[in-house]
Image: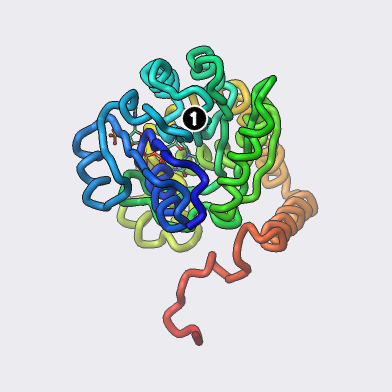
Amino acid sequence: MNVQFDRIALIGIGLIGSSLAHDIRRLGLAREIVVATRSPETLKRAEELGLGDRYTTSSADAVEGADLVIVSVPVGASESVAKEIAASLKPGAIVTDVGSTKASVIAQMQPHIPAGVHFIPGHPLAGTEKSGPDAGFPGLFESRWCIFTPVAGTDETALKRLRGFWETLGSKVDEMDAQHHDKVLAIVSHLPHLIAYNIVGTADDLETVTESEVIKYSASGFRDFTRLAASDPTMWRDVCLHNRDAILEMLARFSEDLAYLQRAIRWGEGDKIFELFTRTRAIRRSIVQAGQDVDAPDFGRPHPLEKK
Ligand code: NAP
């Protein structure tokens, strides 16, 4: 047991909330875990999975007496949650979130957080394409980054405590300002998801290629995009709407670069194409070297005749 907080309230118990619950329990980080989610169906499932010690559909009830409150809901719901919990927060409590966009979450939540409560926005860079309480698992945050975007005047002791919490989950913690976070994430996460949603949508709309052919021959590359394109529509709608400026900027850059590639193909400029593909291959090697992926071919998928 390594109790860090007497009571932790988890507001939202989908992929991220339930993964937190597994780890808090496994590592003995709280004496009590209170789980809150808005729908009775999700709450019932969380209870069946034994994710908490107490369960409620009232976020306000859940945060009463909690030392740490972790909000894990779609970013567009941040303000309504902040409004609901504000009056029930315990003085000295830490309130954090896990939202994929940060400037918007701060704008939505900060005005409602009472003085004496420490609000520290956060974003674990860990996840899968699954959602809901069944999707969570212990160890999701192991060796992954968690980015804090502290607001001016953040209490150092509270920051250190929250950092310690994420580090116990195996995460590496970084700090940056919210605008910078939103730009970085627009390129490393939001744009790739948009490209995936778009390419899968394009394939689905093609009239000269049947849907059965798209599925049948998908291992040629298409299926690698479908993992991202299967991500939760609510979460990603909210990310698009709440990181609008940075996403539009990255989309503009992307469109320009795509036009460059299109032109090189049209004019048979093999050198340009080869130079780009060589540069991008090196990026994959850097990601493996940084421990952010394994070096197994084809993302480690098992192949029938491969030696174990
Ligand atoms: P999820 O599995 O879809 O779970 C969402 C949770 O939020 C559920 O408990 C759901 O409650 C609740 N919720 C949904 N809409 C709500 C609303 N309007 N008001 C209040 N509660 C609402 O989502 P998730 O993947 O855990 O994502 C949660 C947050 O983590 C998001 O902000 C996302 O940007 C961020 N994040 C996600 C990933 C990822 O890979 N998925 C990675 C890092 C960060 P009910 O089921 O009861 O409706």
Q: Which residue extends farthest top?
A: 111
66 sits left or right of 50 in the view: right
**Hey, what amino acid is under mark 1?**
Val
Q: In front: 142, or 229?
A: 142
293 sits left or right of 224 in the view: right
Q: Position of residue 104 (x, y in %)?
A: 54, 21
Q: Residue at x 42, y 17 (%)?
A: 86
Instruction: Ligand 1: give its quadrant.
Output: top left
Callout 1: CB less than 8 Å from ligand 1: yes
Q: Is residue 119 above or below residue 279?
A: above
242 sits left or right of 237 in the view: right
Please identify the quarter of the rendering in which residue 7 is found: top left
Q: In front: 212, or 104?
A: 104
Q: Position of residue 268 (x, y in %)?
A: 72, 49
Q: In front: 67, or 58?
A: 67
Q: Residue at x 38, y 54 (%)?
A: 214
263 sits left or right of 122 in the view: right
Q: Which residue is mark 1?
A: 239
Q: Position of residue 117 (x, y in %)?
A: 53, 22
Q: Residue at x 55, y 56 (%)?
A: 142
| Secondary element type, mark 1 | helix
